[in-house]
Image (tube, rainbow, N blue to C red):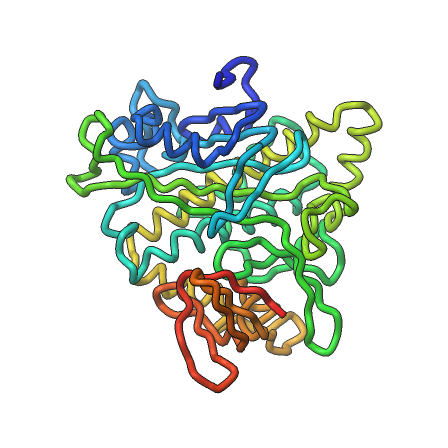
Amino acid sequence: MTVSRTPEPLPLTREVAGDVRWLASVDSTNRLAAQLAASGELNRVLPGKYAGNLNDSRVEAGPDDAAGRRPVAVIAAGEQTAGRGRLDHKWESRPGESFIVSFVTAVPRRLATDPGVAGWLQMIAGLATVDALREVLRVFPPQPRSSSPSSSFSSSSGCHEPVPGEPTRDIEQGMRLKLKWPNDIFAVETVGNGASEGRKLGGILAQMVSLDGVAAAGNAADGEPMVAIVFGIGLNLAIPADRLPTPQSTSLQLIAPAVAKFLEASSASHDSAAATAELTDRIAAGIVTRLDDLLHEFRRDTPGTVTRLLRRMTGEGAAASRDGVAEDAMTAGECWTIGREVEVHYVDGSAERGTAVGLNADASLQFRTADGQLKPVTTADVGVL
């Protein structure tokens, strides 16, 4: 397998990421990302070349590094032939139709292995993805190449903090981007009487990779052992309605009119692959910046960040809407699952129905069974009924 270096795709992502690899086709970007991390080939973003950045990614890079680049590696592909989602679900794609990107960064081992907080890592990746999508769509069609891909995702001093559940300018009216616990990106539409319908736009798979065998200048930042985390993110970008993987799926071109027009115009000029690549580039650049900002806060102040993430996911304490009427959970919180009737499918093959009533401090789902029992759900597929 040959990793393409020239010509270099994803130019905007290269401006913000510490390392970017592009492949026309790959069996799994997550598998390759994990392999590169474990072998030490991503030493630009894993300990130790960027060790000083791991705990504070806003410090200026050294003279041999690109100043301002985030300690995040990006492994992207035009086609994935043997991808896997959470609980070993199959996820493949055709060339030029999907966002197929794995993001690799390092976090302290204590956070990645602590069951009390580790579940938030995947939630952070989900929020970073939603934030990036909203920002890309807000300025779509694309701005001139001279504009910065991360102008609205600046450093912590001026970081863009999206309003939870805020509608996106260039998305279908009445529709919002949401997270379905624990790892799916959904387009959710209000259908009346407080009810809503959601369709899956994409998913996220998080994987921890040990750095014990990496022959770097120590695999720790400030003496703290680190591990690599691979976030595999797949999004349907240009899949037509008649070829969606399930009836409960959607793609960006079906919910964002500006994207549909952009792709249609590109198709007419026989440049559809380039258009999808540009869309991928803009989304990936936004994810790199937002993911790094959120992980930085998570490392710096874990308890405070967990509190803020809980409030954002659940909508707790959300401000009143513009007309003075308090928003419901669907509007205010990022987690669409909360308040819905759901069916939980456990890894042992059993299933039960009930209501998702909230999130716990460890990022598990608070589930009320049909007979009224409350229980946490940590590892399961949860379908909204």
Residue shown at 55% from the left, 44% from the top: 90
In the figure, is residue 172 to the left or right of 334?
Answer: right
Camera-nearest residue between 83 and 126: 83
Say if 324 sits above or below 92 in the image.
below
In the figure, is residue 113 to the left or right of 156?
Answer: left
Residue shown at 64% from the left, 30% from the top: 278
Residue shown at 30% from the left, 57% from the top: 302
In the figure, is residue 189 to the left or right of 222?
Answer: right
Residue shown at 36% from the left, 34% from the top: 71
Camera-nearest residue between 158 and 256: 256
Q: Position of residue 257 (x, y in %)?
A: 77, 46
The mark tally for this picture is: 0
Say if 66 sits above or below 373 in the image.
above
Q: Position of residue 262 (x, y in %)?
A: 76, 36
Camera-nearest residue between 228 and 284: 228
Say if 281 sits above or below 84 in the image.
above
Q: Position of residue 181 (x, y in %)?
A: 50, 61
In the figure, is residue 22 to the left or right of 117?
Answer: right
Camera-nearest residue between 18 and 27: 27
**Residue that sits furthest to the bottom in the current view:** 371
Say if 31 sits above or below 120 in the image.
above
Q: Position of residue 381 (x, y in %)?
A: 50, 61
**Residue that sits furthest to the top in the current view:** 6
**Residue that sits furthest to the front in the current view:** 349
**Residue that sits furthest to the left in the current view:** 223
Which quadrant does the C terminus fall into? bottom right
